[in-house]
């Protein structure tokens, strides 16, 4: 399993009802269902990855999260995961709202566009920055709504969400020690957010 | 997917098969319907393909739709006339008869070997006609279960059905939560819409208004309400196709000619096709069965009472696959999503996919590659869990509710 998914699994309580948005091949959900006794559902847009979930026995709906989550009722999940997906949505704010409508706790991870290498790449080379986490050319990247950790925290605040926990991530997805200046030093970040009752 | 190249339908046939019959309920030991009425004898026509394993864990049931029958795969002597789901069922096919023991039965109330309105009423010796008791999807399932028990199977690897076949799968899982490891519902619904019922109503009117209908007692008059039944079939058939598939198949082409005749006879190709559908339906179908089955569908509403559903779904251990087709307007994707919503709201594991296909409701009978790939992948996984011992996700009843919240 990807290291950042390990970090996420660590925040999911055993037996929780979990929805994974953009669940990929279902490896996180398979782990949560098998090892942590969770009750998991995924949503995935790609047909190939949908079939990978089916082969793992992970319940999954093929669908586009940019269209919302009308299949799921309010607060019907304990945890909703949006891992490395927010930046690829067309309507990030709508997706975040839908996520916090159906779930109590949101776990959001994304690449941090404020990382110093990316800043330096743009400043010094004058070209759209690329990195190990953001390898694609500007016209080919699925990541159309990139943000920095500060940007995300602003959005969370504007949306009335409380940040329960912030975990800076290294390039390999493990949790980073860049606690001090995450917006400059962390390659990515993971947030636990909730909507105060 | 499978490492081997997919075989064509002809190569992968289960071959020569025969329809068998068994009396599952008798006058002395009748079928008790949901209504409390008793029905006996009940004879069932069925076919099986593949071999039941020693542990009896690989049995899989096929629920047919409105006008289907027990002959789902293989052939009865002429390989060019295979069963109605032969493209899905066979050696190496998505429902793989090299691995599964497949059962298909004509449903209760049918007219192709299973007891229905055209069967003799033991009280009079004459066909029941409209004296046949009104039954339900649950009653159809009761008879399926009796057949499964007769074949020595206690728990099925799963059941699949398209359209009203899918309704049987859902009802089965709700009524008998330990029976099915998996359930596949293709272009099905959890309740008919007003539009669906409206189409059914007009189809029934066509039959009821046929002078040869004789109050349903046409069976020994030597005449049948053929005009009404053919008309019902023609209209229903329009709802099974899509605007797109009709355009592709017929467009505005004129039947055997370059110039339109400009009469009231059959002129356009689509008219000829519908007439053929109506006429070819007559020898194999019974008008009373059509009336009953369409009415059974109209009244079916398994999610109607939220309290009953919550209780039923709490017990369900079945893993569901719900599939719809984007051009199906008979039971559009919204119907399947309603199913998904109801199941997911009660923490039942459900997988859903809308398949792109130009062929409308009929797609479930056709070899649409992504549809077949999905069924194949799902069934292989279900087989691993139920037969091969792969660890399944815990069933809803087994799992801890993290916060004590009722499901």
Image (tube, coloured by chain):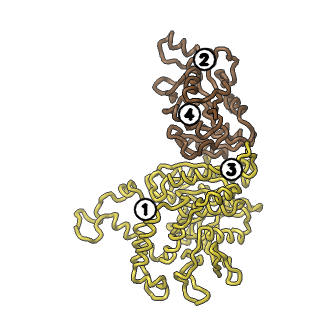
Chain colours: A brown, B yellow
CA–CA distance in space, label 2 to label 4: 21 Å
Local crowd at mark 1 within 10 Å, few (<14), some, or many (≥20)?
Answer: some
What distance separates the C-alpha of mark 3 from that of mark 1? 37 Å
Give percent across and percent down for residue B318. Answer: 67, 55
Q: Quadrant of residue B63?
A: bottom right
Of all chains, the one bearing label 2 is A
Residue position for label 3: B407
Tell me the distance, in whole angstroms, between the alpha carbons under discs 3 and 4: 25 Å
Secondary structure under the numbered disc 4 in the rendered image: helix
B332 or B269: nearer the eye? Answer: B332
Residue sitting nearer the eye, B97 or B357:
B357
Which of the 4 image quadrants contains residue B131?
Answer: bottom right
In space, the residues marked 3 and 2 are separated at their CA atoms by 41 Å
Q: Nearer the viewer, mark 1 or mark 2?
A: 2
Q: Quadrant of residue B156?
A: bottom right
Chain under disc 1: B
Residue identifier under label 1: B239
Q: Is residue A16 visible?
A: yes
Local secondary structure at mark 2: helix
Q: Chain of mark 3?
A: B
Is residue B145 shown above or below B214?
above
**Please, what secondary structure does the residue beneath circle 3 have?**
loop
Which residue, given by chain and number where applicable, does mark 4 sit on? A96
- Residue farthest to the right, as pictured: B55
How far apart marks 1 and 2 lie (CA) works out to 57 Å
Which residue carries the number 2 mark? A183
In front here: B332 or B226? B332
């Amino acid at each position: 399993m990807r290291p950042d998914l390990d970090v996420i699994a660590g925040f999911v309580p055993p037996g929780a009802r979990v929805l994974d948005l953009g669940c990929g091949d279902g490896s996180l959900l398979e782990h949560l269902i098998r090892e942590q006794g969770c009750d998991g559902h995924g949503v995935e847009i790609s047909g190939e990855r949908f079939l990978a979930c089916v082969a793992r026995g992970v319940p999954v709906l093929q669908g586009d999260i940019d269209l919302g989550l009308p299949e799921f009722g309010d607060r019907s999940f304990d945890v909703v995961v949006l891992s490395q997906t927010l930046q690829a949505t067309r309507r990030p704010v709508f997706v975040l709202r839908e996520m916090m409508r159906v779930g109590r706790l949101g776990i959001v991870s994304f690449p941090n566009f404020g990382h110093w290498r990316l800043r330096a790449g743009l400043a010094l080379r004058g070209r759209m920055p690329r990195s190990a986490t953001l390898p694609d050319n500007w016209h080919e990247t699925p990541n159309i709504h990139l943000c920095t950790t500060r940007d995300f925290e602003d959005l969370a605040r504007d949306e009335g969400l409380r940040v329960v926990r912030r975990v800076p991530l290294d390039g390999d997805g493990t949790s980073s020690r860049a606690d001090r200046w995450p917006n400059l030093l962390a390659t990515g970040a993971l947030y636990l957010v909730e909507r105060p009752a | 997917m499978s490492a081997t190249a997919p075989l064509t339908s002809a190569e992968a046939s289960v071959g020569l098969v025969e329809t068998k019959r068994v009396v599952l309920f008798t006058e002395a030991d009748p079928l008790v319907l949901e209504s409390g009425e008793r029905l006996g004898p009940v004879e069932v026509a069925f076919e099986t393909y593949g071999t039941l394993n020693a542990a009896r864990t690989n049995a899989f049931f096929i629920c047919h739709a409105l006008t289907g029958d027990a002959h789902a795969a293989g052939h009865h002597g002429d390989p060019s006339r295979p069963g109605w789901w032969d493209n899905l069922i066979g050696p190496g096919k998505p429902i793989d008869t090299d691995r599964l023991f497949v059962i298909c039965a004509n449903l209760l109330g049918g007219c192709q070997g299973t007891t229905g309105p055209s069967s003799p009423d033991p009280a009079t010796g004459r066909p029941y006609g409209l004296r046949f008791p009104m039954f339900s999807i649950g009653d159809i399932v009761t008879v399926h279960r009796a057949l499964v028990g007769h074949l020595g199977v206690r728990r099925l690897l799963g059941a699949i059905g398209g359209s009203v076949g899918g309704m049987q799968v859902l009802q089965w899982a709700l009524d008998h939560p330990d029976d099915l490891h998996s359930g596949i519902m293709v272009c099905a619904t959890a309740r008919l819409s007003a539009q669906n019922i409206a189409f059914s109503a007009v189809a029934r009117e066509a039959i009821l208004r046929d002078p040869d209908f004789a109050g349903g007692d046409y069976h020994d008059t030597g005449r049948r309400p053929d005009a009404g039944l053919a008309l019902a079939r023609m209209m229903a058939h329009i709802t099974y196709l899509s605007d797109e598939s009709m355009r592709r198949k017929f467009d505005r082409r004129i039947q055997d000619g370059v110039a339109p005749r400009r009469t009231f006879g059959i002129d356009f190709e689509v008219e000829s096709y519908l007439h053929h559908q109506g006429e070819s339906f007559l020898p194999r179908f019974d008008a009373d069965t059509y009336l009953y089955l369409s009415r059974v569908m109209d009244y079916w509403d398994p999610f109607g009472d939220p309290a009953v559903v919550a209780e039923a779904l709490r017990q369900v251990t079945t893993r569901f696959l719900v599939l719809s087709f984007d051009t199906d307007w008979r039971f559009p994707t919204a119907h399947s999503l309603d199913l998904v919503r109801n199941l997911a709201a009660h923490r039942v594991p459900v997988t859903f996919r809308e398949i792109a296909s130009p062929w409308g409701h009929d797609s479930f009978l056709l070899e649409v590659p992504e549809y077949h790939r999905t069924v194949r992948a799902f069934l292989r996984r279900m087989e691993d869990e139920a037969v091969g011992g792969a660890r399944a996700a815990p069933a809803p009843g087994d799992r801890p509710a993290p916060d004590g919240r009722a499901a």
